[in-house]
Structures are given as structure tokens and as C-alpha cells.
Amino acid sequence: MTHATTDRCVLAVDIGGTGMKAALVDASGELLRSEIWPTDAGRGPESVLDNLLDRSAELVAWSARPVAAVGLAVPGLVDARNGIARWSANVGWSELSVRDIASERLGLPVVIGHDVGLGGLAEARLGAGRGVDDLLFVAIGTGIAAAILAGGELITGGAGQAGEIGHVRVDGHTEPCACGAIGCLETVASAAAIARRFVARGGPPGTDAAGVVARLGSDPIADAVWSEAIATLSSVLSASVTLLAPDRLIIGGGLAAAGQQLLDPIRRELAVRRTVQPLPEIVPAQLGRQAGCRGAGLIAWDLLHDEIDS
């Protein structure tokens, strides 16, 4: 690590539908300062972009260390190679050249990545994935998505959309998905789907996924909805493990707050479904809501190191 590296920091921002998590990050991955900014998605996609760039410029100006690069964790369909948000529904971005616009406005090199992919990268280097090179990180929240790491490298695929397991079609389910398909995993096993299916079957209106978990063992509707979600999720995870052979499967996202009530039945289901493939360790994520922001910091530092090496 050079003296110039230790004197600098990077700006990392994880762009969410309601809030943006931002941090100045040093070369060791430590957060020097962190903030949460409102996304203001209700005011339109241009307002989201302006808010992001205005707040970023303020934090760059505040920093006591020179800010050398910016990393952005972007939701939705992301073309990281070309720096484009192809479709980010929660913030209204479509075919937006986020990287180039941000770089021009901030006067800094900018790199972008998919929010779940960067969460997986952060877990791999800083969290529950340390010590293994091949892992699968699955975030289960409003939707379901995964990050695939092989040989320590994040696999994004040619179109930048590797890991969209929430949109794998599952047998026996026909509910329409927001993506336009029918019977996607997300429509059965996401936190949003669990809550929706529980209420639709007669559960108290307004119950969220945490409320369903709290009723397990005492409410037959909750038990049925949860069992279906676990079985469906496990069928897709089993296929993913067979295909990818990860050493570790990390479960994150909002539904991971269920703890062993989620992990133990997944372990049992995968053990039953196992064929020739050894079972990976199945562990909870460690970085929580910081994962995307920390991952954005990592790719910003990677960008700087690549520039030095070239």
C-alpha cells in the first residue's frame, strides 16, 4: 500500500428505493463517515439523480482526505461494464448512463455495480464469505436475487444479469410476477410474497413477513405459507448448488432476520434434495444493510488499483 493510497478515500453509495446509504471508505474498508440520504423517488427519476449527485458532491467537499473515486450500488438491471442502469424500477431509471453522468458532474472516476452483487462481494471479502473462494449469496427481501463468486471473482454474466434467481419459474405456481412472467420464485418465497399470501389466505390484514414468522407454530395459515416458501426456495437453491458447487451459501436480506427459523429448514430441505453434490455451509450474512455500500467502496478501490496496475 503506497503512501498516496493511505492519504485517500473513496465515496460509496448504495441507492435504494427509499434511502441512499453513503460512506467515505478508506483503503482498509473502514467507514470514515456514513450518511443516509432520502432517495426522493416520488419526485421522479431526474430528481433521484440530482439528489444523488448533489449530496455526493457535498460529502466529497466535506472530506478531509482527497476522494479518489466513486462506487455506486444500483438496483434493478445493471450493465456494470458500460456503466448503465438498464432498468431500476424503484428509482425510475431506464437506460441511464449513470457512470458517465456522475463522473462528469463530480469530476471523479466512477464505477457502478448491481446492489445485490456488490452485497455479495462485500460478504465475500469482509463478512460471512471470508476464507472461501466459491460462494453463493442470496438476498431475500421484497424480491430475491443472488450474487455468484467463483475463484473470488464476482460473476456478472455477459449482460450483467447473472444471479436473478428470483425470476426462475417454479412448478405449481401461477401468480403473475412484476417482471411480466408467471410463477417466479419471488411470487412465492420473497418477504413480500410471504406476507401477501398469508393475508390472502385469511391472515390479519397488514401483517408483514416478520409477523408471519412470529406466528409460526401457532397459526396454521402461517405454517402453510412458510412451508411452501421454504420448499420452493430450497428447490431453486438445490439446483443452484448443483450447478455452481459453492463452498458456502450465505443468506441475507430482510427475511434473514428470521434466523434459524429460515436457515434450519433450508438446511434440511437441501440435505433431502442432495444428489452427487456435497452440501455447502449455509450461514447468515454478517454485514446486514451495510453490505451494498461496503461493496460499492470495494469496487471503487478496485478501480483505482486497476488504474495503478495499468
Image (cartoon, rainbow, N blue to C red):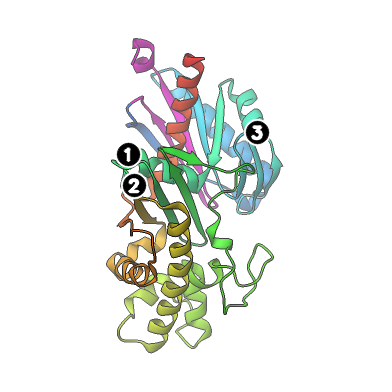
- Spatial separation of the CA atoms under disc 3 and disc 2: 28 Å
| Nearer-the-camera pick, 106 or 134 | 134
Point 33% across, 56% down: residue: 280
Q: Amino acid at mark 2?
A: Leu
Q: From the viewer's perspective, is residue 5 above or below residue 298? A: above
- State which region is magenta: 1-27
Give the quarter of the figure containing the N terminus. Answer: top left
Asked whether the viewer can see residue 20, the reply is: no
Amino acid type, label 3:
Asn
Mark 3 vs mark 2, foreground winner is 3
Q: Nearer the viewer, residue 172 or 90?
A: 172
- Is 227 magenta? The answer is no
Task: Tell me whether circle 2 and circle 1 mark residues in contact (CB < 8 Å).
Answer: yes
Q: CA distance from mark 2 to mark 1?
A: 8 Å
Along the horizontal axis of the image, is 80 left or right of 9? right
Q: Which residue in the protein does label 2 denote?
A: 287
Mark 2 lies on a secondary structure that is: loop
Q: Which residue is mark 3?
A: 82
Is residue 77 shown above or below 221?
above
**Disc 3 versus disc 1: distance between alpha carbons?**
26 Å
N-terminal label among 2 and 1:
1
Answer few, some or many: residues within 10 Å of disc 1's Cα (few below 14, many 20 plus, some between 14 and 19): some
Q: Residue at horizontal 46%, vertical 68%?
A: 233
Task: Determine which residue is flagged by label 1.
Answer: 126
Position in image of residue 188 (x %, y %): 52, 73
Q: For the point 53% across and 36% down, which residue is it?
A: 72
Q: Most extreme residue toward the front, as rendered?
A: 276
Q: 150 or 291: which is nearer to us?
A: 150
Q: Secondary structure at mark 1?
A: helix
Q: Quadrant of residue 214?
A: bottom left
